[in-house]
């Protein structure tokens, strides 16, 4: 019951509408900027190679980055603003419910981000993806989103300072996304950068979506990697936050 | 009397520093229990332990006979007013109340009834549509009080309920506490003890991680070695009779000026004993300074505190 009360508090109509509108506008702006820059629609652009590859990666990027930022922001509230904890605990919502309730809210936020972004992106681009491929794509992106929710929670546990460090972490992550195949496949890189990015989740998720949609491959290795990492981080975070939230 | 809250060997520490150590006592059902102590002596931590916000490192807390750590749903019987607010600044006063009711799972009809009663009593009705960030400290404090009462809890755990309130609202809060006396168990941590001592059934004074004093005002005045100064105005023909008191062991200062006698005794009870031994025919008037609670507490917390 306490978990339901926590979810009711976070799943307000206003918050959901805000989330939907934000991502619809961001996605629409992408096409507007593209059209204004190239004077042509995305699908009719002749000189750019691999549009299909770029577009899903932008969907993955926006979903994962938004999940990461939202997770950082939500855990920052709980870790740094003890009034939130007071509010929950005096209402009978304790450590386990707070942790998993927040995680559920974040997953729901991520799903809205994915569907709104994918809908607007595919609608405006004119690109069609087979339903079976789209389902795999959805599953893989959702799992990647959950992984980044867990990564943000893990980082927030260790880096509790709010401003300086948190901003740097966001910048570093955006940089890693850009280096990890958002625009160009990272196998084009050489040397240590290639080795590092190959094992970073940032690279794996773009590699997975590229293989799935461009090379039409099943991506068991990537799925397994993301799945195991997500599970390991979720268990670790559960233990860490249970201790942290118990005070 | 039946205990509403019982503490058994409760200890709490933060980063290798013990704030509270081995607390053992019960708080009677329906009583008003006041927690005193200097800053950083663990008053707020003690209340947070009772409210379920903090967990004790050792020991057990029982609420209505049930182990709080195993029955954490008991928190629904508590109303907590803490050192941090339970409201959100970007919401209106009314929205904050509704949000709190929602998170507590209060039925809408019950919530409406409670809101109406409490908003009237604590003068919040005119501010329900106002954003909290635009409210004064006094309104915020009233909102915090109402938030702690919205579920009509049987046990109130209040940290500094009179802070930021004007004289009128202090009276309203005090009269509310008087009204629920005997009905609800009230645990209050405060520095405003001069106002609260009239309604407190029992006080504890926290000091050096433990309980320095546990009892009521009467017990405190009889136990504490605090010099007490009184004046007697005597009939002129009875002054000689009074002279014999000069060597009374309970008197530390004997000063006779005309027919006025200034007496400094070891404590209030000694003074009481001395004037009881004097014939009422000898005395025209007795006067004394009212008991200074701040001095009493300072004396209590000094090394020579207890008799």
Image (tube, grey):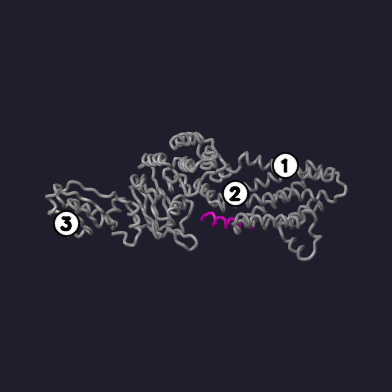
Q: Residue furthest front?
A: B258
Residue named by callout 2: A102
Discs 2, 1 touching: Cβ within 8 Å:
no
Distance of label 3 from label 2 (alpha carbons): 75 Å
Quarter holding the C terminus of chain B is: bottom left
Question: Is the C-beta separation of discs 1 and 3 under 8 Å?
Answer: no
- Judged by its main secondary structure, the magenta piece is helix
The stretch drawn in magenta includes residue A41: no
Q: Which residues are magenta?
A: A232-247
List the residue tagged with mark 1: A25
Q: Nearer the viewer, mark 3 or mark 2?
A: 3
Q: Are marks 2 and 1 on the same chain?
A: yes
Q: Indicate whether B151 appears above or below B20.
A: above
Q: Residue at x 40, y 48 (%)?
A: B188
Question: Residue B248 lies in what quarter of the image?
Answer: bottom left
Q: Relative to residue B90, is residue B228 depicted above or below?
A: below
Q: In the rendering, which numbered label is found on residue A128?
A: none
Q: CA distance from mark 2 to mark 1?
A: 26 Å
x and y, in percent, of residue B289 in the image: 28, 50
Count residues near mark 1 (Cα–Cα under 10 Å), then give few for <14, some for 14-19, many for 20+: few
Residue under circle 3?
B245
Q: Chain for mark 1?
A: A
Structural crowding at the residue carrying mark 2, measured as other residues with C-alpha within 10 Å and reported as few (<14), some (14–19) or many (≥20)? many
Q: Is residue B169 above or below residue A221?
A: above
Q: Quadrant of residue A184?
A: bottom right
- Whether the magenta-drawn stretch holds residue A245 is answered as yes
Label 2 vs label 1, nearer the camera: 1
Query: Mark 3 falls on what kind of element?
Result: helix
């Amino acid at each position: 019951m306490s978990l339901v009360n926590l979810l009711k508090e976070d799943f307000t109509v206003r918050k959901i509408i805000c989330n939907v509108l934000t991502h619809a506008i961001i996605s629409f702006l992408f096409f507007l900027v593209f059209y204004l820059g190239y004077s042509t629609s995305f699908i009719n652009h002749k000189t750019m190679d691999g549009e299909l590859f770029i577009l899903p990666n932008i969907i993955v990027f926006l979903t994962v980055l938004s999940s990461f930022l939202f997770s950082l922001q939500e855990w920052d509230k709980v870790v740094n603003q003890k009034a939130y904890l007071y509010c929950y605990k005096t209402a009978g919502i304790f450590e386990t419910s707070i942790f998993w309730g927040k995680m559920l809210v974040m997953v729901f936020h991520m799903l809205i981000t994915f569907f709104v972004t994918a809908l607007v992106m595919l609608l405006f681009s004119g690109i069609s993806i087979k339903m079976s491929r789209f389902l795999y794509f959805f599953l893989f992106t959702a799992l990647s989103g959950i992984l980044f929710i867990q990564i943000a929670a893990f980082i927030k546990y260790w880096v509790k300072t709010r401003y300086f460090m948190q901003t740097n972490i966001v910048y570093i992550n955006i940089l890693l996304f850009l280096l990890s195949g958002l625009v160009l496949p990272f196998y084009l890189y050489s040397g240590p950068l290639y080795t590092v990015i190959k094992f970073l989740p940032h690279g794996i998720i773009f590699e997975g979506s590229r293989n799935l949609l461009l090379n039409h491959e099943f991506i068991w290795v990537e799925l397994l990697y993301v799945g195991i990492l997500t599970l390991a981080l979720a268990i670790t975070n559960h233990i860490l936050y249970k201790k942290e939230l118990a005070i | 009397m039946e205990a509403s809250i019982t503490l058994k060997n409760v200890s709490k520490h933060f980063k290798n520093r013990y704030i509270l150590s081995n607390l053992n006592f019960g708080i009677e059902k329906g009583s008003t229990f006041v927690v005193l102590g200097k800053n950083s002596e663990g008053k707020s931590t003690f209340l947070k332990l009772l409210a379920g916000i903090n967990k004790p490192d050792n020991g057990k807390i029982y609420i209505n006979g049930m182990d709080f750590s195993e029955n954490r749903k008991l928190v629904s019987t508590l109303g907590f007013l803490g050192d941090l607010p339970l409201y959100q600044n970007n919401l209106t006063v009314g929205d904050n109340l509704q949000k709190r009711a929602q998170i507590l799972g209060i039925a809408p009809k019950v919530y409406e009834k409670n809101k109406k009663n409490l908003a009237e009593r604590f003068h919040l009705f005119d501010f329900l549509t106002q954003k909290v960030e635009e409210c004064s400290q006094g309104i915020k404090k009233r909102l915090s009080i109402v938030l702690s009462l919205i579920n009509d809890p049987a046990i109130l755990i209040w940290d500094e309920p009179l802070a930021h309130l004007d004289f009128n609202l202090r009276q309203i809060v005090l009269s509310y506490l008087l009204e629920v006396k005997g009905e609800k168990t009230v645990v209050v941590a405060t520095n405003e003890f001069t106002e609260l001592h009239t309604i407190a059934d029992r006080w504890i004074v926290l000091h050096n991680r433990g309980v320095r004093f546990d009892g009521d005002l009467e017990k405190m005045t009889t136990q504490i070695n605090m010099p007490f100064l009184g004046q007697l105005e005597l009939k002129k023909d009875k002054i000689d009779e009074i002279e014999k008191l000069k060597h009374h062991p309970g008197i530390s200062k004997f000063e006779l000026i005309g027919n006025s006698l200034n007496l400094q005794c070891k404590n209030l009870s000694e003074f009481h004993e001395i004037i009881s031994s004097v014939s009422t025919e000898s005395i025209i008037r007795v006067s004394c300074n009212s008991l200074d609670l701040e001095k009493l507490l300072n004396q209590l917390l000094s090394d020579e505190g207890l008799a």
